Image (spheres, helix red, strand yellow):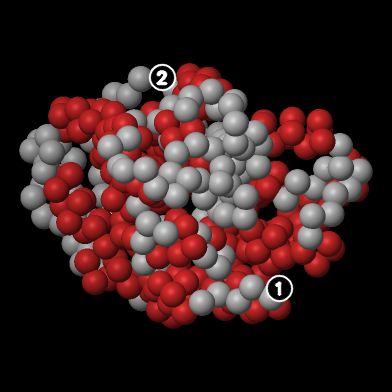
């Protein structure tokens, strides 16, 4: 059944955001190689080898889904852009300044060529790893989100014109286009080799970093939200989607590096997001909707922006390259997680929420969308790996959030 303009809240998707950021934290923790026991360190790194890629893909699909779910036909592009800017730029500015100071303290200060594009969140448009992976390197995903936000008013107007019975064709097209990116990257001339995984920096940039390519995951989220809103049926429920996601993740670790980044998991991610949203919309909820997990999900953006800085520079403070016994390493990672969580709570409370109130403005009440018939015509942090690949170089980037 189609849903009206008075749409139910989706607290489980907020909880799901925290699960996604946990995956990114687990991945980045492996990059610090904290375990003195090489066998244990390798086992951990191999287990979370694709967790960072998976978590960021979740963010992009979730972003498209949630923005579409909350969009209203009377909203203006300027109002939407103002709210998005209020959401991301204050925290980005703070963590950008922190990264600038920490890099200067470490003796490797950022250059203007790195700092300025990063500040403006346009650094992922440069196929140069020193630029797109600069400063607080997880900010590359914000650069992609800025592109999504700029395109969203036009994109949602176009998607609303798609007849509901044809939405699944468009969603399938977006999902099937994702594996075409690594195939397209094979046409690029040989260039600087990646220090992790396989392929060149230019190929990695095209497949994983360039906002245009990552917009496919965002578009999938937009289309799936429209499918749920218009009452379209989707296969399976949460258990089926979770099983498919686990299988896709296992497959991603065995595919060639560039193909394993997002190709095997994008469809299960989309199905899981849609299934969780359908359950919330039906009033059934899930464990993801528990208040504590929802609150953690609300802190997830701040957590994403601070955790990598803490892991990298905290390790440097304790001794760069130093390793510890298993109990000590686990304790240090737990401490890094707890400190990241504490700082994210403070930033969410003292910066993010006040900025949204002061800068985001209030949205005017919009007329309802038509729930049936022809569609109407009118109109919110990855990684650097360390585990060895199946053959040759490690699958993970060292010292980068890609």
- Asked whether the viewer can see residue 305, the reply is yes
Residue to which mark 1 is pinned:
106
Please tell me which residue is depicted at 74% across the width and 54% down the height of the picture: 337
Quadrant position of the N terminus in the picture: top left
Q: Where residue 393 sits in the image (x, y, percent)?
A: 60, 36
Residue 5 tag number: none
Image: 110 above or below 26: below
Residue 145 placement: quadrant: bottom left
Q: Secondary structure at mark 1?
A: helix
- Asked whether the viewer can see residue 289, the reply is no
Q: Secondary structure at mark 2?
A: loop
Please tell me which residue is depicted at 33% across the width and 53% down the height of the picture: 211
Q: Where residue 240 sits in the image (x, y, percent)?
A: 48, 19
**Badge 1: residue crowd in 10 Å (few <14, some 14–19, many ≥20):** few
Residue to which mark 2 is pinned:
236
Q: Are marks 1 and 2 in contact (CB under 8 Å)?
A: no
**Badge 2: residue crowd in 10 Å (few <14, some 14–19, many ≥20):** few
> Along the polypeptide, which appears first: circle 1 or circle 2?
1
Image: 389 above or below 30: above
Image: 158 above or below 43: below
Q: CA distance from mark 1 to mark 2?
A: 50 Å
């Amino acid at each position: 059944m189609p849903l009206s303009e008075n749409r139910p809240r989706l607290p489980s998707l907020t909880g799901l955001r925290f699960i996604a950021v946990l995956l990114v934290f687990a991945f980045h923790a492996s990059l610090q190689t904290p375990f003195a026991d090489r066998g244990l360190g390798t086992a951990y790194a191999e287990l979370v080898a694709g967790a960072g890629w998976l978590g960021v893909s979740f963010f992009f699909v979730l972003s498209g889904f949630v923005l579409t779910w909350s969009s209203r036909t009377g909203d203006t592009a300027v109002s939407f852009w103002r709210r998005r800017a209020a959401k991301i730029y204050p925290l980005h500015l703070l963590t950008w300044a922190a990264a600038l100071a920490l890099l200067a303290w470490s003796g490797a200060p950022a250059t203007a060529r790195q700092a300025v594009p990063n500040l403006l969140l346009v650094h992922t448009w440069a196929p140069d790893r020193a630029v797109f992976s600069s400063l607080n390197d997880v900010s590359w995903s914000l650069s992609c989100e800025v592109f999504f936000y700029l395109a969203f008013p036009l994109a949602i107007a176009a998607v609303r014109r798609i007849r509901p019975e044809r939405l699944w064709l468009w969603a399938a097209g977006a999902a099937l286009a994702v594996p075409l990116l690594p195939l397209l990257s094979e046409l690029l001339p040989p260039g600087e080799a990646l220090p992790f995984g396989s392929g060149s920096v230019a190929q990695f940039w095209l497949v994983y970093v360039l906002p245009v390519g990552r917009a496919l995951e965002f578009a999938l989220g937009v289309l799936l939200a429209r499918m749920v809103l218009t009452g379209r049926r989707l296969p399976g429920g949460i258990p089926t989607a979770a099983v498919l996601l686990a299988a896709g993740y296992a497959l991603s670790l065995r595919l060639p590096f560039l193909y394993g980044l997002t190709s095997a998991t994008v469809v299960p991610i989309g199905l899981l997001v849609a299934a969780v949203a359908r359950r919330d919309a039906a009033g059934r909820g899930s464990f993801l909707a528990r208040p504590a997990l929802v609150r953690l999900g609300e802190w997830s953006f701040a957590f994403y922006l601070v955790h990598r800085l803490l892991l990298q520079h905290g390790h440097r403070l304790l001794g760069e390259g130093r390793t510890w016994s298993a109990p000590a390493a686990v304790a240090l990672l737990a401490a890094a997680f707890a400190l990241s969580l504490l700082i994210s709570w403070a930033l969410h409370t003292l910066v993010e929420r006040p900025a949204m109130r002061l800068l985001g403005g209030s949205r005017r009440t919009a007329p309802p969308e038509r729930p049936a018939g022809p569609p109407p015509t009118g109109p919110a942090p990855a990684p650097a790996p360390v585990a060895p690949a199946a053959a040759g170089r490690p699958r993970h980037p060292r010292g980068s959030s890609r």
